[in-house]
Image (cartoon, helix red, strand yellow):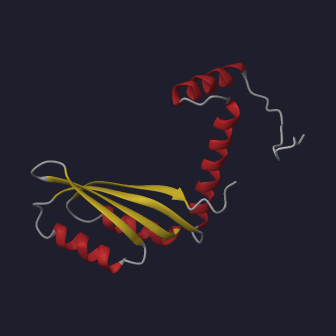
Amino acid sequence: MKDGNGLTRFGVSLSSKLLKDFDGLIARKGYTNRSEALRDLIRDSLVQAEWEAGDKETVGTVTLVYNHHTRELTHVLTDLQHHYHQTIISTTHIHLDEHNCLEVLVVKGKARDIKKIADRLIGTKGVKHGKLAMATTGKELA
């Protein structure tokens, strides 16, 4: 049933335990109602589908933690970033301590290309930890 705001209302059947667990989750996350929590779950699934398709324009971040004293590592990471300059649109470099650095790269492009770049950066010898966080341009979401 649609209301005047373009919203459609529908019913969902869940077991009592699943609903109780869901209500606990949305309370911990600070949602004010179930509808907003469901919308976010649906949006997250749609963003995941964008990434799985591989050919949609997406955005995300690649986070790297590494010891900057590792021989040639800084040079290799910088060269890779220059090579993929069309996809890497911004970087932030933070000195965590006298040895370790955190680098966050903002990326935009086809999902399959971003995954390849992230894998290459994360897989570089000397990177202690890396993670690709996938997001969306928002163009496909309501």
Image quarter (top left, top right, bottom left or bottom right) of the C terminus: bottom right
Image quarter (top left, top right, bottom left or bottom right) of the N terminus: top right
Task: Decide if residue 58 is on the left or right side of residue 96.
Answer: right
Residue 106 at x, y percent in the picture: 40, 63
Compared with 85, 140 (above or below) is above
Residue 78 at x, y percent in the picture: 24, 72
Counting the numbered discs, the total is: 0
Compared with 118, 83 (above or below) is below
Task: Decide if residue 98 is on the left or right side of residue 125.
Answer: left
Compared with 89, 37 (above or below) is above
Q: Quadrant of residue 70?
A: bottom left
The residue lying toward the viewer, choosing from 119 and 10, is 10
The residue lying toward the viewer, choosing from 84 and 21, is 84
Q: Residue furthest front?
A: 4
Residue at point 61% right, 61% down?
50
Residue at point 67% right, 42% down?
39
Residue at point 50% right, 63% down?
59
Residue 76 at x, y percent in the picture: 21, 73
Residue at point 65% right, 54% down?
46
Q: Quadrant of residue 90?
A: bottom left
Task: Decide if residue 104 is on the left or right side of residue 96.
Answer: right
Task: Decide if residue 54 is on the left or right side of residue 141.
Answer: left
Residue 114 at x, y percent in the picture: 45, 68
Q: Residue furthest right?
A: 1
